[in-house]
């Protein structure tokens, strides 16, 4: 399969971000995923086994279906989109089938609060499959 565009893969480390409380660790247990809206943007939160937190675009790059509605395999760290069975490795934000990547937001835990960094760059914060 063709590769998705890599442009805007994640926030530049030097970019100005606004930290916004998205949920709590009581709402997002280890091994779970959760879709949230942060500053008007759909975000997928993943609390991986071992405690790592990741935040990605909340919609599939193919047909804008909520990724959290897919089949989550916490042992493999793989999410299968409910739309057309696209697979994403949520440990890296990488597409498995097809290849490519999800837009990645900075995320942190402050006490019990899970916070997502929303870039203040005025740009788009998701990747899309290139139109043909």
Image (cartoon, rainbow, N blue to C red):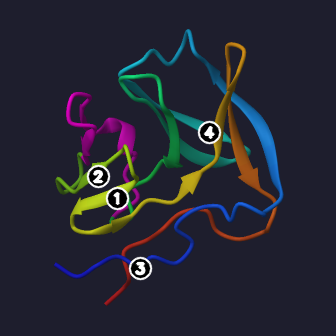
Question: Which is more N-terminal, label 4 or label 3?
Answer: 3
Read off the residue under disc 1: 94
Quote the CA–CA distance across marks 1 and 4: 21 Å
Would you say 113 lies left or right of 53 here? right
Is 96 contained in the magenta span?
Answer: no
- Look at discs 1 and 4 and give the one toward the viewer: 1
SS at mark 4? strand
Mark 1 Cα shell of 10 Å, populated few (<14), some (14-19), many (≥20): some
Residue 44, above or below 49 = below
Quote the CA–CA distance across marks 2 and 1: 6 Å
Are discs 1 and 4 less than 8 Å apart at CB?
A: no
Mark seen at residue 37: 4
Is 66 contained in the magenta span?
Answer: yes
Question: Which is more N-terminal, label 1 or label 2?
Answer: 2
Residue at x 61%, y 62% (from the top left corner): 125
Mark seen at residue 33: none
Quote the CA–CA distance across marks 1 and 3: 12 Å
Bounds of the magenta segment: 63-81
Please state which of residues 130 and 109 is positioned toward the viewer in this rendering.
109
Would you say 85 lies left or right of 110 here? left
SS at mark 1? strand
Residue 4, above or below 43 = below
Residue at x 77%, y 36% (from the top left corner): 20
Q: Position of residue 102 (x, y in %)?
A: 43, 59
């Amino acid at each position: 399969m063709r590769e998705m565009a890599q442009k805007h893969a994640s926030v530049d480390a030097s970019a100005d971000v606004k930290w916004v409380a998205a949920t709590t660790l009581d709402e997002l247990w280890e091994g779970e995923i959760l879709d949230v809206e942060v500053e008007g943007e759909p975000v997928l939160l993943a609390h991986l086994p071992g405690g790592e937190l990741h935040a990605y675009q909340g919609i599939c790059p193919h047909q804008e279906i909520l990724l959290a509605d897919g089949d989550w395999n916490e042992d493999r760290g793989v999410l299968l989109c409910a739309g057309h069975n696209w697979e994403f490795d949520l440990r890296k934000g990488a597409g498995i089938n097809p290849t490519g990547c999800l837009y990645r937001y900075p995320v942190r835990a402050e006490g019990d609060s899970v916070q997502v960094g929303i870039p203040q760059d005025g740009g788009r914060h998701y990747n899309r499959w290139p139109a043909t």
